Amino acid sequence: VHPTAARRPHAIVVQSENTSYSDEYITASFKNRGAEVTVSDGQYIINPTVQSFEFQTKRAPSKTGLMMIGVGGNNGTTLCATILANRHNIVWHTKQGIQQPNYVGSLLRASTVRIGNDPATGKDVNVPVSDVLPMVHPNDLVLSGWDISGVPLDKAMQRAQVLDYDLQRQVAPHLALIGKPLPSIYYPDFIAANQEARADNLIPGSDKQAHLEHIRADIRKFKEDNGLDRVVVFWTANTERYSDIIPGVNDTADNLLASIKSSHSEVSPSTLFAVAAILEGEPFVNGAPQNTFVPGVIELAERHQSFIGGDDLKSGQTKLKSVLAEFLVNAGIKPLSIASYNHLGNNDGHNLSAEKQFKSKEISKSSVVDDMVDANRLLYKAPEVGPKGLPVGKGEHPDHIVVIKYVPAVGDSKRAIDEYYSEIFCGGRNTISIFNECEDSLLATPLILDLTILTELLTRVKYRKTSGETKEFAPLYPVLSLLSYMLKAPLVKPGTDVVNSLNRQRNALESFLKACVGLESNSDLLLETRIW
Ligand code: NAI
């Protein structure tokens, strides 16, 4: 993946009456086809639907900054160091030989999308995903962030023990220029007590309104100092415990703002950062599992039309689970139990060894098979229907457990062990066991990049309905569920269903990018190969 590959202004040009290009915008018309289904006397009555839209994408990527909360941690330092290695083309020696920097593991930078066929050969033509629409190049991101630990980034990278020594050695002087993380907010109750020793770089006081103002000022200053159009604020700090959702405290936007003013104890640091970003009109992405997005945050994001996305990076075990569970259920095989064990030895593992923080992770890892099970009522019994005609409970489900243990010796090299135990033909049983050794931060870092770059892109896309009365172009809905591919517990528009299937998540993203340039969604019908 050559770093300059997608710096061309028009990597692809669509010649069609559906697509037009101006200096400023790409505009494409799109037909959203679906079907309405009702059930009557046991029969499914289906009415195909079609709605016409236009998408308008601002062509020039924003000059974008990435401010990470937890920049001094394993993910934060790995991301800064690897971007710098790519930017300065630092090569390093490993015991296997010479290693070039790259963006392997990034959906945008290291994977492709099929855009059609070569008429001469009939062969598929695939292009890098990042060529479909103009996107920020990761090398161009301006980096900054906060951390409760004041260790400068070059030293923090050494502490993380993720990167090869020869890379650390060469990249350290570049990292040293970013220097020390900005002081952050520390409310000890939200992360594990074992983190306290790190907390030496704090915004003073306990006034949450003052903390909010401080973070907002940090974002503004970073933006101004670097002449940025856009700042993506990204939580890659320790996993917090869940916040209680308390009526009158964090259930509405106004209540949440009032609770910040009165320094209510249930407002977490991550929620404060999210509110700061929203009030500054900058997107916020949550890379950890806690419920940062309490209902008041979502309402505030809607009110300010400011983008949010989350929760929890989907790097290893859950990514595989969202593929394997779907494969089994779609093959007509019935998983009876999924048992997942993890052990890891980095600071994330240390924090997760505390019960409340583990609980946040357990919740985010647990719901990943729900939609696949719900979609197949041949295998799993539907929930009973209660007296009011509503379902009671979730219906039949596989047993699903998640265990996480802290084993310092393995460091950042997390082990994930999964057993899928399934019912097969006529009462038979099938067991699949997986041992997945992940270099945690090297899997997570490209996801942070993809999330940041996609988020910036989605701030440049507007849409309007063209069937019926034509409206003005409007921004997308603030909760960016199109980011689901990279997230374990995708946040979606309230009242809509979460899609966990990795294939469907990727398909949604590809289809959306293509729609923005006026190309049809993916079709594997390949009719020309089926007919004379
Ligand atoms: P880490 O523990 O190395 O880094 C977290 C950093 O956050 C630390 O430097 C800590 O000092 C800082 N921090 C804690 N509270 C803070 C606050 N209020 N303000 C500013 N900084 C604060 O952890 P790592 O491995 O970088 O992971 C970061 C987060 O990403 C964790 O929540 C983890 O669960 C999540 N995650 C990581 C994945 C991975 O594969 N590495 C995958 C999925 C999620």
Image (cartoon, rainbow, N blue to C red):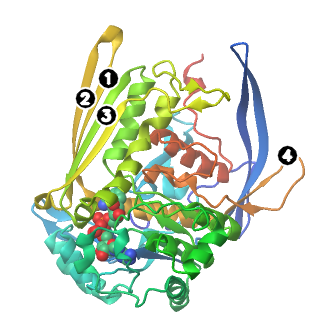
Dot 2 or dot 4, earlier in sequence: 2
Instruction: Give the residue type that dot 1 points to.
Output: Ser
In the rendered image, the vertical position of residue 286 relative to residue 182, given as above or below: above
Instruction: Give the residue type that dot 2 points to.
Output: Ile
Quadrant in which the N terminus is drawn = bottom left
Residue 410 position in % (x across, y down)? 13, 58
CA–CA distance in space, label 2 to label 4:
49 Å
* Element class at badge 4: loop
Which residue in the structure is indicated by mark 2? 432
Q: Residue furthest right?
A: 469
In the rendered image, the vertical position of residue 179 relative to residue 19, given as above or below: below
Quadrant in which the C terminus is drawn = top right
Which residue in the structure is indicated by mark 3? 338
Residue 110 position in % (x across, y down)? 39, 54
Side (left or right) of 204 relative to 436: right
Kindly identify the residue that appears in the image at 50 percent across and 36 percent down.
371
Dot 2 or dot 3, earlier in sequence: 3
Instruction: Give the residue type that dot 3 points to.
Output: Ile
Which residue in the structure is indicated by mark 1? 422
